Image: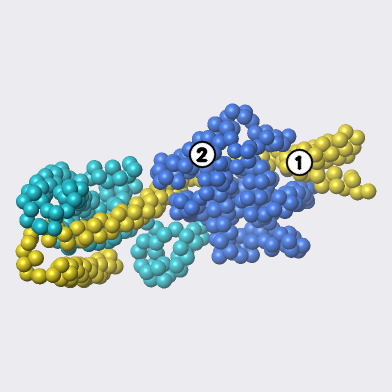
Amino acid sequence: MNGHEKIRELLTLLAAGVLEPREEKQVLDHLRTCEACSAELEDWKLLAGGLRRLPTPQPRAVVVERARAQAQIRLSEEFEHRWNRSVIVGLIVFAWVLTLLSWPLVRLLTGGLLGLLVPGFSHAWIVFGAFTTSVWLAGGAAAVLLSMQHRRERRLA
Amino acid sequence: MSRFTEELSLIPRTARIVAASVWIAATTGLIVLVKSGVDRELASAPPALRIFVTLFPPIVLTIYALLIGYVYADAKRRGMRYVMWTLLAVFIPDGIGIILYFVLRDPPMRACPSCAQLAKSGFTFCPHCGTSLLPTCPNCGRGVELGWANCPHCGTKLPVPGTRAA
Amino acid sequence: MDMIGGTGSFRLKMHSATGLGDSAAYWEGRVALEGDVARLRGGDLDALSTLLTRYQNRLYRYLLRLVREPAEAEDLFQQTWLRVAEKIRQFDPQRNFEAWLFTLARNLAIDHLRRIRPESLDQPAGDPTGETAAARLPSHERPPIEGILARERAGRLGTALETLPLTQREVLTLRFEEEMKLEEIAEVLDAPLSTVKTRLRRALERLRMTLETQYPGESWQ
């Protein structure tokens, strides 16, 4: 039976402190009677102790500070993006509210004027629809032109 | 929601005053209009709707005014052309100008690590003291990021740290 | 059983050699860590700074053991923290933050080595020939002076440690320098417990063999 061999394998792991309680007990029981293995365990413990006591290399302070600064910038950028996204969603909702609001509001402000110009109820909504669409088109065209100019500027900067 | 309140505090006082005035004026104007019965359909509508028409539009217009104020102050602190952006926010209708601003705005300015002055976020060197804000490509001198193998502007292979680059 | 919302197992198993130290201090430390991580996930810059300070030496040491060159370890150190900033939003708070941090560092180090010195990476652990390796010192450049001085200070043990293959070096440093539990090491290496145990055993055996071969009969301390 290779009990001794198996124990020898477990000795290293015991010195490393990673044995289960059951295995640990097994080994300790064996050690009570075996001198050779006890001596061996001491060697391993010495090695483990040496590893634990290795001097800790330290990073240079300038490296740490640069890492800190850059990581903080990146962190705030990430959260900026997330914040921006929620703001934009909110603004799109707002823009829709504004658009839909302009229809009845204009109607209200002009009172019965539009009613005189356009005889039927449905016609009024067509006028408003045309108005809103043209507004969106004009705004959209302005937006496209503006972003093109902006991108050009960014690239040259 | 403290980020929200933090951003709100940016709105300049002038804008807040304008917004408050808009609110008062719009509410008053709408009350007058609704009461006058000019719009026949509205006159016969349930009172809840009439109250809604009086209260809701002014709120929206006030928010619009506050947003314009925010665009002004925010564009300024990001080093953008704030007059232009404010005008765009005002005149492009249906709030599209405002959305455009938020989509296109520059990232916040960064403080230089040595002279602590603010610089726009894409800058590779501080415009006040010249310290490097980003690692640079040895060939074209433009800013690159840590961990990149090649420069995205000129394509040169970037040196590995720790080796003696030519 | 989670006593404090979500860091992982409640570790009652006190292995004889690990010495968790004072229990109260241990739990205080864990609670503080939880708080910092939670604030970091909310975008708190100070929390990032606190965590960076707390882990700066350990992280650097781990990276240095992996890549063996101080300049490269410094660069990877910066990259690791950038990655932390980038990925903290996707970090599951139930997970162990330390293990995650070391895993990030490890992945960056291995990608780096793969690009720069692919011969310094090992064969997969399953390959029986994989673990036999000659001394793996950087082959194409003179070691910079800081490296030489650091090796002097580390003494014979440190030098011998450097000659081990990467998979063995890292398991030794995680166990003895980081004092990580077996489960944590397994998480960082993304390997089963049995593999970690085997690597640990082989690493110790090889280290001892190296020392006894290099300094026969003498003390290597």
| Colour blue, chain | C
Residue B116 vertical placement versus A28 (above, below): below
Q: Identify residue for label 1.
A: A20
Residue C170 vertical placement versus A42 (above, below): below
Figure quadrant of residue B107 = bottom left
Number of the label disc, if any, that sits on residue C143 = none
Q: Is residue C96 left or right of residue C208?
A: left
The colour one sees for chain B in the rendered image is cyan
Q: In which chain is the residue bearing label 2?
A: C
Q: Nearer the viewer, residue B142 or A128?
A: A128
Q: Residues within 10 Å of mark 1 (few under 14, many from 20)?
A: some
Residue at 62 percent across and 29 percent down: it is C23
Residue B85 is at least partly visible in this image: no
Colouring rule applied to residues: by chain
Residue at 7 percent across and 53 percent down: it is B37
Q: Identify residue for label 2.
A: C34
Q: Residues within 10 Å of mark 2 (few under 14, many from 20)?
A: many
Figure quadrant of residue C130 = bottom right
Q: Is residue A128 left or right of residue C160?
A: left
The percent coordinates of residue B99 (x first, y second) are 25, 59
The percent coordinates of residue B113 (x first, y second) are 34, 47
Q: In which chain is the residue bearing label 1?
A: A
Residue A46 is at least partly visible in this image: yes
Q: Secondary structure at mark 1?
A: loop
Q: Nearer the viewer, residue C58 or C70?
A: C58
The colour one sees for chain A in the rendered image is yellow
Quadrant including the C terminus of chain C: top right
Tag 1–tag 2 contact (CB < 8 Å): no
Kind of residue at badge 2: Glu
Residue at 63 percent across and 38 percent down: it is C1
Q: Is residue A106 left or right of residue C109?
A: left
